[in-house]
Amino acid sequence: MRLYLAQHGDAVPEAEDGKRPLSERGRADVARLAEFLQRAGVRAGHVHHSGKLRARQTAERLAEAVMPGGRTTVVADIAPNDPVAPLAELAGRWSVDTLVVGHMPFVGRLAARLLTGREEPPVAAFRPGALVCLERDAAGAWRIAWMVAPELLSPPG
């Protein structure tokens, strides 16, 4: 089973728009990530995201690449500072490849918890638009399969 953890794309400053949608750069970064995932043949049975606009926008664009025709799902309790234990426990029971789009420090702490059993220190360098692919083996142990960040990807097209 694979768990794809993504930090939402770059968002506009709160002073500019309190809802903090993706910025132009954020939309471009997420488009590059979506194209990469599609070309790599990544598929997910579920795409979950927090209720924040920037996470939803990121999840919807990535879902077009990894789950064509599928619908994204809002998941409670994955805001930036929410505890990660409940989702870590749930992810341990998932049997379908799943993409979760969230926020820092939540996604960073979740990755660390799954990989080491502890939320600190960080195990992956998340930043807006970055994604890490974790794999769970038959014994339930997680490992990092790969990670990608927007600056490593060429523009779409």
Image (cartoon, rainbow, N blue to C red):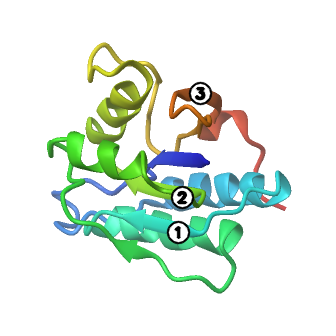
In the picture, the disc for residue 132 is none
| First-in-chain label (2 vs 3) | 2
For numbered disc 3, what is the local secondary structure?
strand
Is 28 on the left-hand or right-hand side of 118?
right
Pick the residue in front: 14 or 150: 150
What type is the residue that disc 1 sits on? His
Query: Badge 2 is on which residue?
Result: 98
Element under disc 1: strand
Residue found at x 26% / y 23%: 119
Q: In x, y percent, where is residue 26?
A: 49, 55
Q: Amino acid at mark 2?
A: Thr
Give the mark, 2 or 1, whose residue is nearer the N terminus. 1
Q: Using a 10 Å C-alpha cutoff, classify the residue at mark 1 as few (fewer than 14 neighbours), some (14 to 19) or many (20 or more).
A: some
Q: Dot 2 lies on which element?
A: strand
Q: Are marks 2 and 1 in contact (CB under 8 Å)?
A: yes
Identify the residue shown where x is 41% and y is 32%. 111
User: What residue is pinned by disc 3?
Assistant: 144
The amino acid marked with disc number 3 is: Ile
Gap between marks 3 and 1 measured at Cα: 19 Å
**Quadrant that contains the C terminus:** bottom right
In the figure, 149 relative to 77: above or below?
A: above
